[in-house]
Image (cartoon, grey):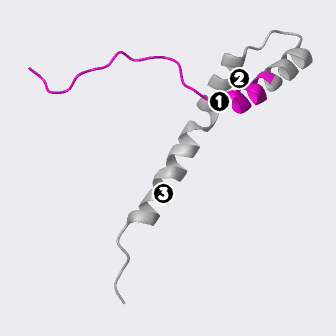
Amino acid sequence: MSLLVEAKKNPMVYIGSKRRKKIEQLAITLSHLSGNQVSVSNVAQKIIDTYFEEYKEKSISEIKETFSPQPRK
């Protein structure tokens, strides 16, 4: 028997009301400009798809710089 218990995965991610409002406004603007319905989910997914790798690499690099041992003088 495994000691690890797999919890049910919830597809929802809390982003807070201020971030949600920004994404909603962008979806409305994009919908208006394109003449096609652009959903809040589509905008959020596109942001993640577009910037995930960049954010990942930057975050890993910053953590390595912050927590790597400094050479002795």
In the foreground, 59 or 20:
20
Q: Residues within 10 Å of mark 1 (few under 14, many from 20)?
A: few
Direction bottom: furthest residue: 73
In this picture, is 36 found above or below 28? above
| Circles 2, 3 touching at the beta carbon (< 8 Å) | no
CA gap, disc 2 and disc 3 = 27 Å
Q: Tag 1: residue type?
A: Gly
Q: Residues within 10 Å of mark 3 (few under 14, many from 20)?
A: few
The quarter of the picture where residue 20 lies is top right
Q: Which residues are magenta?
A: 1-24
Quarter of the figure with the N terminus: top left
Q: Which residue is mark 2?
A: 43
Q: Which residue is mark 1?
A: 16
The quarter of the picture where residue 5 lies is top left
CA gap, disc 1 and disc 2 = 15 Å
Q: Which residue is mark 3?
A: 61
Q: Residue 68 location in percent, x, y?
A: 37, 67
Q: Residue 31 location in percent, x, y?
A: 85, 15
The residue located at (36%, 80%) in the rendering is 71
